[in-house]
Image (spheres, grey):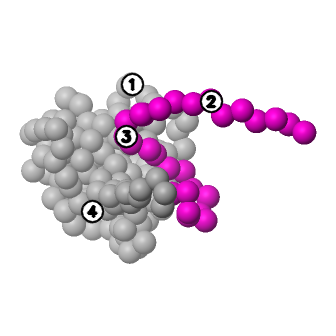
Amino acid sequence: MDTIAVIKERKHPNHLPYPTSLRATVITTTMRDGKLNVSLADDPGAVKLICTQQKLFPKFKPKSSVIVRGFKTGYSCLFTHKDTTVSVSRSLNVPEEIKRQAVLLVNPPEPTVLKLNQVEATKDLQTISVQGVIVTLSTILTNNL
C-alpha cells in the first residue's frame, strides 16, 4: 500500500492500473460534468481523484477512510476506470493543514477580478489573465540605448 507522496513521485501518467493500493481519507466531493471529483488525503499529502464510475460514487463519503485499488495516475490527479475497486478502511489521522489543501483541490477559490487600470496600479508582481475584446492594436517600439 502506497502513500499519496509515493504516488506523486511518478514523473508521468501511467495508462495501466496502479500496481498497489492507496489508503486515504475522503475530505470532500464535488460533482462536475457527470464525474465525481474527490479530494483524498493521508498524512504526507493530498490528491484529487476523478471518479467516472457511477457505481463507485456512493463509496466516496466525506470523512470516511477508503482503500482504492486499480486506479490510473495522471499528471496532477488520479482516475478511476472499470476495474477500480473501493473498500472501507480504518480511519486515518490527517493534519488540518493537509485537509485544507485537499479541499482546495476540488473547490478552488474564485479568482480576483480587477479592471485594467487597477492592474496597472498594483505593486504586486503577479501573473494575471486578461479577458475582453481587443478594440485597437498598435505596435510598441522600444529602442535599446
Q: Amino acid at mark 3?
A: Gly
Mark closest to the chain's N terminus, 1 or 3: 1
Look at mark 1 in the image and give the residue it sits on: 15
Question: Which element type, helix, strand or loop, lies under badge 3?
Answer: loop
Residue 85 visible in the shown view: no
Instruction: Determine if the magenta segment contains residue 114.
Output: no
* Coordinates of residue 62 in the picture (x, y in percent): 19, 62
Q: Amino acid at mark 2?
A: Thr
Q: CA distance from mark 3 to mark 2?
A: 19 Å
Q: Residue furthest top?
A: 15
Q: Residues within 10 Å of mark 3 (few under 14, many from 20)?
A: few
Q: Marks 4 and 3: which is nearer the front?
A: 3
* Coordinates of residue 133 in the picture (x, y in percent): 37, 36
Question: Which element type, helix, strand or loop, lies under badge 2?
Answer: loop
Mark closest to the chain's N terminus, 3 or 2: 3
Look at mark 4 in the image and give the residue it sits on: 27
Q: Residue at x 42, y 34 (%)?
A: 134
Q: CA distance from mark 2 to mark 4?
A: 50 Å
Which numbered disc covers residue 115? Answer: none
Magenta span covers which residues?
119-145
Query: Position of 125 compared to 90: left or right?
Result: right
